[in-house]
Image (cartoon, rainbow, N blue to C red):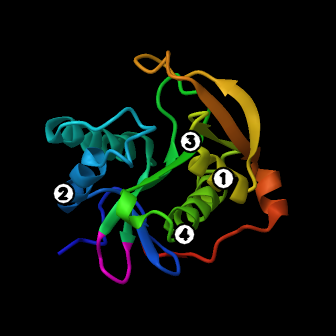
Amino acid sequence: MISFNSPLGPTIETARLYLRPPVPEDFPGFCEFHRDPITMKHLGGVVADSVTWRIMRTGAGAWALDGFFMFSVLCKQTHEWIGRVGPLYPHHWPDREVGWGLISRFMGKGYALEAAIASMDYAFEQLHWDKVVHSISPENFESQRLAQRLGSVKLGPGALPDPHASVPIELWGQTRQQWRESNRLASVAYLK
């Protein structure tokens, strides 16, 4: 059984999804995500479960220390863990970001868009960020289309910190004012 509550932060409910910080029961989903070659194509490649364990706990640590990070995304209908989407701002990152990634079997159903809209709302309205970017590989056309659907525009090339400094990325993004003017605000409920 998947827990819908996390001691680390809020749970957001959208039409088809729950978004909340990670809990230990999410680990099998995180492993499926990081073993999936389609999912990981633009995210550095598949990794071992031992690395995934550290990645998941790094996210939980960011929630504990910073009060935000990517949400675990759960399908309301099946209660399955389907991916992670949300705000992040690692040390030396180009800017405050809302990023996304789903297990490939859940792609193409509109879940990433739904979760990203709720996450953009959260970043702008709850975290009070003035700007959000998305760091996207130049070959990741699916993520570029999602950024465009969110109303983000290409800002130009960007650079990630080591150990990813040699990986080419393009920054996409928008301001809080642009988000509000686009009228994309999600219909969400904060459950905690």
Q: Would you identify the image quadrant in which residue 26 lies?
A: bottom left
Q: Pointer 2: what residue?
A: 28
The secondary element bearing badge 1 is classed as helix
Q: Would you identify the image quadrant in which residue 54 lies?
A: top left
Marks 4 and 3 sit apart, C-alpha to C-alpha, by: 17 Å
Q: Pointer 4: what residue?
A: 110
* Residue 84 at x, y percent in the picture: 40, 55
The residue positioned farthest toward the left in the image shown: 50
**Which one is earlier in the sequence, the residue at label 4 or at label 3?**
4
The secondary element bearing badge 3 is classed as loop
Q: Pointer 3: what residue?
A: 140
**Which one is earlier in the sequence, the residue at label 1 or at label 3?**
3
Residue at the spot 75% in from the left edge and 55% down from the top edge: 151
In this picture, is 17 found above or below 171? below
**Which one is earlier in the sequence, the residue at label 1 or at label 2?**
2
Marks 4 and 2 sit apart, C-alpha to C-alpha, by: 23 Å
Residue at the spot 59% in from the left edge and 28% down from the top edge: 169
Q: Nearer the viewer, mark 1 or mark 2?
A: 1
Foreground: 21 or 94?
A: 94
Residue 76: say if magenta.
yes
Quarter of the image with the N terminus is: bottom left
Q: Nearer the viewer, mark 3 or mark 2?
A: 3
**Which one is earlier in the sequence, the residue at label 3 or at label 2?**
2
